[in-house]
């Protein structure tokens, strides 16, 4: 199993951001436990964007755009209103339907990264749904393994361009600078939300005078 520190080295974040969450409260609210490897990923990185693929959703932050439960509620609402064709992303429904999708990542380009909540949480497959059309990709492994494979081009997802393809397309631009080559990176976010609609905060970044969790 890949360690989150390996992903940190790939994206240029050599130290954990020490993001803490009241997991007991969050999981009680959701009505289900979340995978342990996801909790490790969230602890190390906290909210932010894994360039060039997805934004990591985490529970407990004020920002609705980054909060996992708020994103799930959005899809549940669209499904209830019949605004998602087929009652979900075909052939899926959304959690809490049996085996339903539960989002953990969003792409700036429209793809959504989910768990398929089948069986025990630590065995949930990852499902990536395309930005348009009924296309999806299922990965039989955990979030940490998936993210590592995605960032090291170990996956062949038909509707997601590889880093090589992204850079090859960019190179066609006459103004392209080789120093602007797209590489895996992490852009941190603090999860705050200074506008109306902020959520109750049940997550925080530990400070240096707080002991590291073991």
Image (cartoon, grey):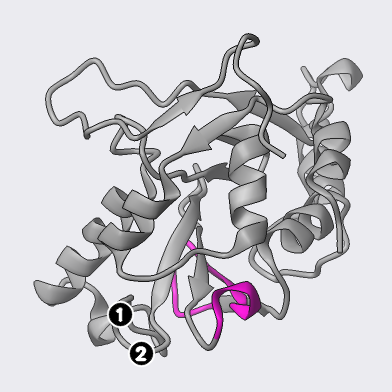
Which of the numbered marks, if any, corresponds to residue 51?
Answer: none
Residue drawn at the location 88% of the way across and 63% of the way down: 154
Q: Residue 206 placed where, x, y %?
A: 56, 21
Q: Residue 80 placed where, x, y %?
A: 12, 75
Of 27 and 162, the residue lying toward us: 27
Tag 1's secondary structure? loop
Residue drawn at the location 47% of the way across and 45% of the way down: 57
The answer to which quarter of the image holds residue 184 is: top right
Of 214 and 147, the residue lying toward us: 214
The local crowd at label 2, few if under 14, some if 14 to 19, many if 20 or more residues have their Cα within 10 Å, is few
Q: CA distance from mark 2 to mark 1?
A: 13 Å
The local crowd at label 1, few if under 14, some if 14 to 19, many if 20 or more residues have their Cα within 10 Å, is many
Of 186 and 206, the residue lying toward us: 206
Instruction: Answer with left or right where residue 198 lies relative to residue 50.
Output: left
Q: Is residue 110 at least partly visible in the picture? A: yes
Residue carrying label 1: 88
Of 71 and 128, the residue lying toward us: 71
Range drawn in magenta: 120-135
Residue extending farthest top: 209
* In the depicted structure, whether residue 12 falls above or below residue 138: above
Q: Is residue 126 magenta?
A: yes
Q: Is residue 128 magenta?
A: yes
Residue drawn at the location 29% of the way across and 78% of the way down: 96
Question: In which quadrant is the N terminus drawn?
Answer: bottom right
Which of the numbered marks, if any, corresponds to residue 98?
Answer: 2
Instruction: Answer with left or right where residue 179 lies relative to residue 144.
Output: right
* In the depicted structure, whether residue 166 falls above or below residue 24: above
Residue drawn at the location 90% of the way across and 21% of the way down: 178
């Amino acid at each position: 199993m890949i360690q989150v520190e390996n992903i940190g080295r790939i994206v240029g974040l050599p130290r954990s951001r020490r993001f803490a969450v009241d997991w007991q409260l969050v999981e009680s609210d959701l009505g289900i436990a979340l995978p342990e490897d996801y909790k490790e990923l969230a602890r190390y990185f906290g909210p932010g964007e894994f360039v060039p693929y997805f934004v990591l959703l985490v529970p407990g932050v004020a920002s609705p755009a980054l909060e996992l439960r708020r994103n799930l509620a959005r899809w549940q609402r669209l499904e209830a209103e019949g605004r998602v064709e087929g009652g979900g992303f075909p052939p899926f429904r959304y959690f809490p339907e049996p085996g339903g999708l539960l989002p953990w990542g969003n792409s700036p380009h429209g793809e959504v990264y989910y768990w398929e909540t089948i069986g025990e949480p630590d065995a949930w497959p990852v499902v990536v749904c395309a930005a348009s059309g009924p296309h999806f990709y299922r990965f039989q492994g955990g979030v940490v393994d998936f993210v590592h494979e995605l960032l090291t081009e170990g996956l062949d997802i038909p509707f997601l361009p590889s880093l090589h393809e992204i850079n090859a397309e960019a190179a066609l631009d006459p103004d392209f600078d080789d120093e602007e080559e797209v590489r895996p990176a992490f852009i941190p976010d603090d999860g705050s939300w200074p506008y109306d609609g902020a959520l109750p905060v049940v997550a925080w970044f530990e400070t240096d005078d707080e002991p590291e969790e073991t």
